[in-house]
Image (spheres, rainbow, N blue to C red):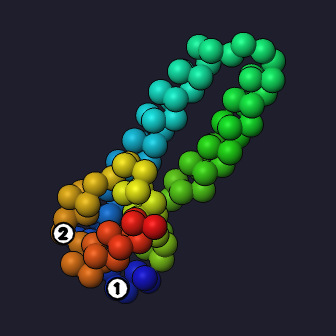
């Protein structure tokens, strides 16, 4: 969906939900890493944690900027992962919310 298909109100709602989803992803990652870091029985476990963090950092940085072109896909992934609720998207066009809901089921 391009920018022309989003109202200014929808853009603001989407940006707020997007920022909240990213913040929740960061908090989830921090919590998970704290748990994993408390149980590193050997150096291989430490290396595996490093690899995991590298992948997660790449993913976080990759979705750090809101883009209306890919927003519905990003929201579907965030809903699927429990980072954003559909209620946070209220105010978007009903068709957009329906698309996010449908895509989040797969």
Judge the density around disc 1: few (<14), some (14-19), many (≥20) Cα neighbours within 10 Å. Answer: few
| The quadrant where residue 8 appears | bottom left
Please, is residue 69 above or below residue 52 in the view? below
- Rendered residue at 74%/23% (across/down): 45
* Image: 72 above or below 5: above
User: Do labels 2 and 1 touch, CB within 8 Å?
Assistant: no
**Which percent across, then down, holds residue 15?**
35, 60
Q: Can residue 3 be seen in this view?
A: yes
Q: In the figure, is residue 77 to the left or right of 53?
A: left
Instruction: Say whether residue 18 is visible.
Output: no
Query: What x and y, as percent, mark residue 44?
Result: 81, 23
Which residue sits at x=66%, y=36%? Answer: 53
In the rendering, which numbered label is found on residue 42? none
**Percent from the top left, x then y, of residue 13?**
26, 63
Instruction: Give the SS element for disc 2.
Output: loop
Q: Where is residue 58 in the image (x, y as percent from the top left)?
A: 66, 49
Q: Residue at x 26, y 60 (%)?
A: 86
The residue lying toward the viewer, choosing from 67 and 100, is 100
Residue 89 vs residue 6, the one in the foreground: 89
Residue at mark 2: 91
Q: Residue shown at 44%/83% (left/top)?
A: 2
Q: What element carries label 1?
A: helix
Label 1: which residue? 5
Q: Earlier in the sequence, mark 2 or mark 1?
A: 1
């Amino acid at each position: 969906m391009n920018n022309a298909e989003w109202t200014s109100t929808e853009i603001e709602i989407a940006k707020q939900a997007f920022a909240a989803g990213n913040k929740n992803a960061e908090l989830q990652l921090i919590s998970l890493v704290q748990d994993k870091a408390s149980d590193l029985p050997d150096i291989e476990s430490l290396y595996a944690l490093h690899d995991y963090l590298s992948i997660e950092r790449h993913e976080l940085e990759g979705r750090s900027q809101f883009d209306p072109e890919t927003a519905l896909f990003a929201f579907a992934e965030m809903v699927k992962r429990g980072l954003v609720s559909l209620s946070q998207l209220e105010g978007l066009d009903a068709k957009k919310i329906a698309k996010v809901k449908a895509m989040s089921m797969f």
